[in-house]
Image: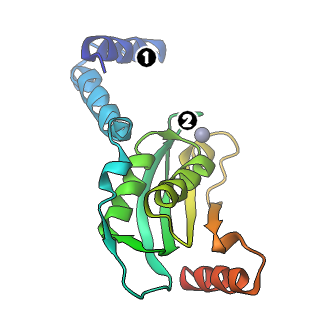
Amino acid sequence: MNKISAEDSVIRLLEMIGEDPQREGLLETPKRFSKALQFLTKGYKQDPQELMKTFDVGNYDQIILLKDIELYSMCEHHMLPFIGRAHVGYIPGKKVIGISKIARIVDIFARRLQIQERLTDQITQCLWNGLAPVGVACVIEAHHLCMRMRGVSKQNSTMTTSSLKGIFLEDSSKGIAARREFMGLIK
Ligand SMILES: [Zn+2]
């Protein structure tokens, strides 16, 4: 990000809303805002595939789940935060990754301008490509400040999205059982 022009743009925005960018409380705001925005969108510069250091799984063929991963992202429509939790599970093929890597993958995709639907899908797609699992599933529950603070001002509505791949999508009895187990575990 070009810092000079980013800060100039914030000064322009402050003027546009009727503020005085020269008053004391706002003097450092353009710099701080630019820095915060850079942090909140740093996922663009990170490649989640680099986290895909895998291990052999042995005989384990059941669900591996990381639940309640805190999630902070920004909607691409309003550049306002959406905040929630992600639950990510997979059934390994031959390979697994360290469980903390899953949380980092969630962060990398969350720290970009997003829509929740795409974010959910990018997380499963990344694990699908990197691990070739039997199945992978992600559910995200989040509330969107663009809805709470403006627009319809709905304070308590939560948006839920899910992305399922592999066995979790299948209509076979195994697929149905896997899906039911995952949904039960994240309740
Ligand atoms: Zn929005």
**Beta carbon of the mark 2 residue lies under 8 A of ligand 1:** yes
Which is more toward the observer, 2 or 169? 169
| Direction from residue 19 to residue 138 in the image, left or right | right
Q: Tell me the residue at 27%/25% (across/down).
A: 29
Q: Which mark is residue 76?
A: 2
Q: Is residue 67 above or below residue 105?
A: below
Q: Which residue is mark 1?
A: 13
Give coordinates of residue 76: x percent, y percent: 55, 35
* Image coords of residue 50 (percent x, y): 31, 49
Query: Ligand 1 lies in which image quarter?
Result: top right
What's the residue at 70%, 70% (across, down)?
Answer: 169
Give the quarter of the image for residue 157. bottom right
Quadrant location of the C terminus?
bottom right
The foreground one among 23 and 136 is 136
In the rendered image of this protein, does residue 107 appear above or below residue 21? below
The amino acid sitting under disc 2 is: Glu
Instruction: Tell whether 80 sits left or right of 34.
Output: right
- Which residue is depicted at the point 35% across and 14% down? 11
Q: Are marks 2 and 1 in contact (CB under 8 Å)?
A: no
| Up/down of 174 relative to 110, above or below | below
Dot 1 falls on a residue whose secondary structure is helix
Q: Between 92 and 73, which is closer to the camera in this rendering? A: 92
In the picture, residue 96 is in which quadrant? bottom left
Whether the residue under disc 1 has CB within 8 Å of ligand 1: no
Amino acid bearing label 1: Leu
Q: Residue at x 70, y 80 (%)?
A: 175
- Seen in the image, is 114 located left or right of residue 42? right
Measured as percent of width and height from the top left, residue 132 is found at 50, 64
Q: Secondary structure at mark 2?
A: loop
Disc 2 versus disc 1: nearer the observer: 2
Indicate the position of residue 144 as horizontal and vertical percent values.
Answer: 57, 50
